[in-house]
């Protein structure tokens, strides 16, 4: 994903949402419509940070973020989320 | 577009929205009324920035911005959006 | 307009709204009631700025501002708008 | 009005509203009930300012202020408005 | 009132509301239920101020304050208001 | 109460509400259900303060606080309130 | 719990909620559905803090937090809460 041609501004991060898991914790396979919206994703582009606030996440990190975080954008026909680093809870 | 006679104040940016794409990702041509409002545009004028906060975008950049960002203005009979740099998500 | 006897406080600016345009872009003359409320005006008085924030606009500038910006005031029987400089989008 | 015994705190200003004008711009005399609530007044007392923010208006200035600015107070049987300096638009 | 055993925190002030005036400006004596809630009171205790912001009012001052300012507290069977100094308009 | 094993974070304070007074000011004994929720309590634990803001209240102080201040917590089967120091009006 | 592979960002903390207590203070065993949502938990991961604000809680602390604090996350099939340190009331 290194070649993605997008430069997020300030403290923004572009995340590629992980596909929803096909199985529940107990191993039951769930049909497509019941899949939970993913909250886990891979960082594919990172802004330069705000004044005096360097970024913590970096390209390639797997991150957890809130269910309603970010804005959906489409780059080269594929969907990503662009959000502020403060919308990211943790690196896993 | 270099000759546009407008000087945005502070951290404001004038963006010329890109025309809506005529085809969907799958290649179907869609009629005019179904076109999505563009979220991609070209920067045509940039303010001087706020105190101690220089601007990142520059004239000629193609940018992504939120669906409801900015205010429509008309310059020489053509429509533009004027928004704050913080309303811009990324340079593409 | 140089002789207007008013001293705006802090970062306030007095603007004389431009008369609404009599013709649409396509050249159709529109009746008076359909005229859009002007968003373009001439700066006639400028405050001294706030602490450490000098003003950018100056008397005589033509400016663009939001449709609902400012408060109408009447000076010597004529209507003006008084607004903060941050309500002004751009100098044209 | 110099002898008014009141000391506004911080950035507050006591204003004596000007009597509503008896005539409209076109010279028609209007009955009492149609008078517009005045937005012009005389400064009769000024606070010491906030930390590092000296006051701009001074006793005796005629000022313009918003229609809903300030709180009515009664001093020696007469009505005044007490407001913050930031509620004052301009000195006229 | 000097012996009141209460130490307001930070920028808080304890005020003893003045009794409502028995007569209107025109000298008519009004019955008890029509009395306006007092907005004038005597300062009986003053906090130590906030960091770098010394207090302006002092014990014994008569002050004007907003109709809905402060919280009623009862000390030794008597009602007082405790409010922030910023809720006080002026010393009279 | 010195041995209470709880360390409030930042500017938080643990208060043990005083029992509601059994008698009204006029000496009438009121039944249990009419008792007012206490607004007076004893400080039993104090946080370390926020950066550059040392705490004013200390263990053992009797304090007044707003009727809806704080969150009820239960420690060793007994109810306390945990609140920010700024929710405390005064030391009595 | 030392080996939990998660790195909270900024001032965030991962808490493992304590199981709801099976008995009430008076010793009555309550059925499962009546159990109160726990407000006590163990800290299992701590962020690096925000600029100039080091963290106070550390891994292994038992903490009290508000009933509606944090966001539920699932790590390796187990539920945790991720919250800001400011959502934590006290260490017990």
Image (cartoon, coloured by chain):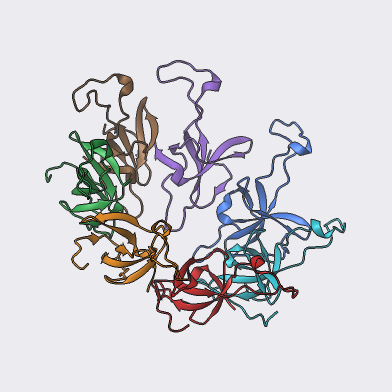
Chain colours: A purple, B blue, C cyan, D red, E orange, F green, G brown
Residue G47 seen in render:
no
Which of the two residues, D50 or B32, is positioned nearer the viewer here? D50
In the foreground, E68 or F41: E68
Front position in the image: C82 or D33: D33
- The quadrant of the rendering that contains the C terminus of chain C is bottom right
Left or right, C25 with reference to E77: right
Front one among D89 and B39: D89
Quadrant of the rendered image containing residue C2:
bottom right
For the N terminus of chain C, give its image quadrant: bottom right
In this figure, what is the number of numbered marks?
0
Left or right of D65 in this view: D35: right
Q: Which x, y percent locates residue C11?
A: 55, 70
In the depicted structure, whether residue C22 falls above or below residue B71: below
Residue drawn at (47%, 53%), measured in percent from left and top? A49
Q: Position of residue E52 (x, y in %)?
A: 31, 68
Q: Please, is residue D32 above or below residue G89 in the view? A: below
For residue G45, side relative to residue A34 (left or right)? left
Q: Residue at x 62, y 58 (%)?
A: B13
Does any portion of residue E68 appear in the rendered image?
A: yes
Residue G73 on image: x %, y %: 39, 32
- Residue D71 at x, y percent in the picture: 48, 65
- Name the residue rendered at 66%, 47% in the picture: B40
């Amino acid at each position: 994903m290194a070649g993605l041609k997008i430069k997020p501004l300030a403290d923004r991060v572009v995340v590629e949402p992980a596909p929803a898991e096909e199985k529940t914790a107990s191993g039951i396979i769930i049909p497509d419509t019941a899949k939970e919206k993913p909250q886990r994703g891979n960082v594919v582009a990172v802004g330069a940070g705000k004044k005096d606030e360097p970024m913590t996440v970096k390209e390639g990190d797997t991150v957890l973020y809130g269910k309603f975080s970010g804005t959906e954008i489409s780059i080269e026909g594929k969907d990503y989320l662009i959000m502020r680093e403060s919308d990211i809870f943790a690196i896993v």
